[in-house]
Amino acid sequence: MEALYIYLIKSSGLIALFYLAYYFMLRKETFFTSNRWFLLLGLFTSAVLPLVVYTKIIMVESSSKNIDWSRIPITNSIENEPFEINWYIVFGITYAIGIILFMGKFVFDFYSLNTVLKGKTIQNQADFKFIDTTENVAPFSYFNTIVYNSSLYSSSELENILEHEKVHSDQNHTVDVLISRLFCILFWFNPLIWLYKKAILQNLEFIADNEATKKISDKKAYQFTLLKITTHENCVAITNHFYQSLIKKRIVMLNKNQSKKSNSWKYVLIIPALVAFVILFQVNVIAQEKTAVQATTEIIKANEKSVDVYKINKNTTDEELKEKSSNLKENYAIIATFSGIKRNSKNELTAIKVDLKKGKEIAQKMETKGTEAINEFGIIVSKDDNGMLTVNFGSDETIINQESIVIAPNAPSVSEKEIFINGKKVSQDDLDKINPKEIAAMNVNKNDDKQEIRIITNNHRKMINENDIYINNEKVSQNELDRLDQSKIERMDVNKDDKTIRIITKNGIQYSQEKNLPVPPTPPTPPVFNIKTPAPPAFPKAPKAPKGDPIKGDKKAWKEFEKKMEDFEAKMKKLEPQMEAFDKQMGEFDKKMEPFNKEMEAFEKKMKVYEQQMEEYHSNLERERKK
């Protein structure tokens, strides 16, 4: 609902911009047709431009913090919950009621129009339909239908009136009237939209007067007709009618000299204002943390002996992609598949999907697509002294996929880091004793070359989530609680009966991060296995073939090679039962991983929602910063 309010505010601002530009610069000009399109363009621009968003990526330092619950004093108290009004709902209901009322008025006007037209005799002439009614209504046109009462006017006056209405009908001015009415319904709360509609209708009359007088010999007689019609105020809504209350302005415009063509530069002045609107409000800033890249780079430098980077940029050809796939297969037995390839008119890559596989050990993928050329990225393959193989996607600015796949007999040690469980500092032994299934959330922070691992258990998180949280007597969400600066907490009371947690701060609420910062979803916990990760059998080393040709070369050496090959094949045959057992173990391992893989798919969907929330958050942050 907040997004709807923001859209209505932006659109209302653009409507005001176009109306003020017309009122102060174009209202007195005789560019009536150009003014018509300017006013219509203003309405459509106001509806569409707030939906156009441009994305800008900036790099920021990580500022994640966790609440140390062990440092907060806890007491018990009972307090009544304060009454709260949800203003979003109040404004939403008010807006809906306004739309219903004005839509009802719109439908009633159609009914009134149908009452006037129903059962009347129609005379067809060229592209027009004429209805000569006996009712006391002002002459009007509705699309190609023109209604008038001939008994009220002389033949010359009727001729002037019909020429005027023919212009309305021929130029489809009824469409402008209906569009302006619809915008009045949607933006009924904006007082300028009613002035905007009045400006549109008035300009249509200027157009009809200007075109009609070109076909009428007596211009003064036409003006006298305008004065006579002012006595007929019974007009039909949602139509172009000859009578208008601003007859004086119409007569002034009829006698005004044509504006100079050089004054048309005024239309261009709206463009800088629209550009400023896009820059200030329609640029979506996405922040990406630098620490993820730095941590990954440090791990690579500390643990890896050799690193191969297969770079892919916008100018990479299909032949080069095939070569990289061949090299990955030859050097690391990794099957790289490139699909979803799209290029623009400059033959630059705009979309590509990369799938990496190595048996059942590696299954990694990455996809990037858009209308612009892709940023350069690389497939990073590294290997350390212990034979641990790591595969990751990365670039100079950001890690495209922060989850790398590591093949190693043992996980890297975290004993050098500071470890906190539920806010209390613990040792590596304490961490080893925790059942992974009890972990609700785990954050890894690095500040000033100091790494911390902070873990929240299910029991602790359950205690927090089951209670309503109040900060300074104002109910807040878990997100706002996580962002509270611990040093500013004076007292925290926990009421088990009412299931409430009430926090009093020293000098008002002070957050450690910006307000409304979205909270990322918690990744699933990997399953705990009672068996070790299956290890493949130790394969014998294949003999090296001697140099030269088997026939013309060293025959003795080739005979020895053939004998070694027979021994090698015999050893490989003996390994077949072990290979079957290894395949069976891998099958069991895969079955146990299936639930975790499903949880990871659900986690990835939540991450996409979180990324959208972060985009909106940074867009609002940038907008507030520029105010």
Image: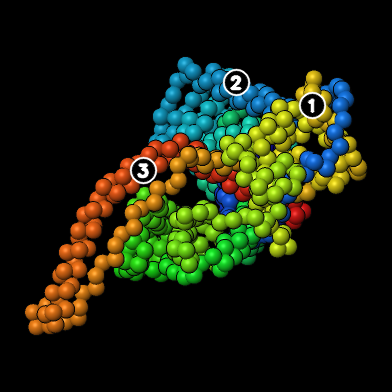
Sequence-first disc among 2 and 1: 2
Q: Earlier in the sequence, mark 1 or mark 3?
A: 1
Foreground tag (3 vs 2)? 3
Q: Residue at label 2? A: 108
**Amino acid carrying mark 1 in the image:** Thr
Along the horizontal axis of the image, is 69 left or right of 577?
right
Could you classify mark 3 by the number of other residues whose Cα lies within 10 Å: few (under 14), some (14-19), or many (20 or more)? some
Q: Residue at x 47, y 63 (%)?
A: 386
Residue 42 rendering spot, x and y as whole percentages = 61, 48
Looking at the rendered structure, the secondary structure element under dot 2 is helix
In the displayed structure, 290 sits above or below 176; it is below
Residue 155, how many percent across, how many down?
A: 54, 32
- The tag on residue 585 is 3
Alpha-carbon span between mark 2 and mark 1: 53 Å
Residue at image position (48%, 40%) is 529
Q: Secondary structure at mark 3?
A: helix
| Residue 189, image x, y percentages | 71, 34
Q: Residues within 10 Å of mark 2 (few under 14, many from 20)?
A: few
The residue lying at 62 percent from left, 22 percent from top is 104
Quadrant into which the N terminus falls: top right
Residue where numbered disc 1 is placed: 500
Residue type beneath disc 2: Phe
Task: Measure how far apart labels 1 and 3 are at the Cα level.
Answer: 50 Å
